[in-house]
Image (spheres, grey):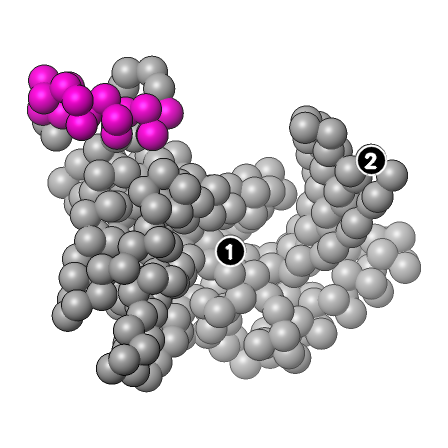
Amino acid sequence: MRAIWPAEAGEVISVDGKTLCGSHDRTIGKPAIHLVSVWAQHSRLVLAQRAVDAKSNEITAIPAVLQLLDLKGCTVTIDAMGCQTAIAGQIVRQGGEYVLAVKDNQEQLHSDIADTFRYVADDNWEGVAHHHTRTVEAGHGRIETRDYWLITEPDYLRFLNPKNAWRDVGGIGLVKRQRTIGDSTSQEEGYYVLSGSPTVEGFANAVRGHWGIENQVHWVLDVTFNEDASRIRTGEAAQNFAVLRHIALNLLRQEASAGSIATKRFRAALDDAYLLRVLQT
């Protein structure tokens, strides 16, 4: 993957974990394997993966998988589990920038960011360097509106990061999502910490694009490759087959002919010439 990934400046790299549900073996007390994967949003490639140790969690696996990559000029997005000062520092040291979701595992930071946005909104954003954009998507009977706010005011950032524990902080973000399906409307908020010199458009693209690893990798592996139904579990076989599925998904995505991943898989099974073309992509 290092050989074929273009590593374009501005690439957004998403990191997320997935449990291989069928890989457990209760008879010997073996839990299901949990893999942390890295997805390049623009290139649409799975770049790397690392299994989480049975006695650990994603916090130890994320640094290990990031170490495999050249992050120069890239923005790394991670959900709340990866919102750690050490991980943020590693991303910056490797030449990248970060957009990290902040939730209750960083209770003080989460509370401070939420209070900050409430305070400046109540004060009509007076004297605060901030930016806003909105996206609206409609389809399949659903309307989804997302409002993105980004605060880059240095005084506020110093207040939120008094000991410089969060390296190179350049902004804090708020996303408000409103989803309407028929007569039902739901709302939710999400908070983020960002490094560098972020823009609200880049913030919106990074947050929205992060779900590509769920929709275009994890969902495809479950639905098209039947990954969760796989009962391969002897030794390291489950992890090895997960790597092979990632490679197969990358090859099928890179092959330029029309058709879904499922269609391409079926065609490759029937047509050796097409299979060879996929393998030589």
Quadrant, the C terminus:
top left
Residue 129 visible, this orientation: no
Front in this rendered view, residue 143 or 124: 143
Give the extent of the magenta segment.
260-277
- Residue 67 lies in quadrant: bottom left
- Residue 40 lies in quadrant: top left
Front in this rendered view, residue 8 or 45: 45
Residue labelled with disc 1 = 99
Residue 111 inside the magenta-drawn segment: no
Q: Is 253 above or below relative to 223? A: above
Residue labelled with disc 2 = 182
What residue is drawn where x is 31% and y is 70%?
Answer: 24
Q: Is 93 above or below relative to 178? A: below
Question: Residue 178, image x and y in percent?
Answer: 77, 45
Question: Residue 276, image x and y in percent?
Answer: 9, 24
Residue 32 visible, this orientation: yes
Query: Does 167 sit left or right of 62 as displayed?
Result: right
What residue is drawn where x is 84% and y is 43%?
Answer: 184
Query: For the residue labelled by badge 2, is the local secondary structure a helix, a strand or a loop?
Result: loop
CA separation in Å, label 2 and label 1: 33 Å
What residue is drawn where x is 60% and y is 38%?
Answer: 201
| Three-letter code, disc 2 | Gly
What residue is drawn where x is 54% and y is 81%?
Answer: 163
Question: Residue 251, image x and y in percent?
Answer: 22, 33
- Residue 277 lies in quadrant: top left
Query: Does 126 sit left or right of 32 as displayed?
Result: right
Query: For the residue labelled by badge 1, is the local secondary structure a helix, a strand or a loop?
Result: strand
Front in this rendered view, residue 56 or 204: 56
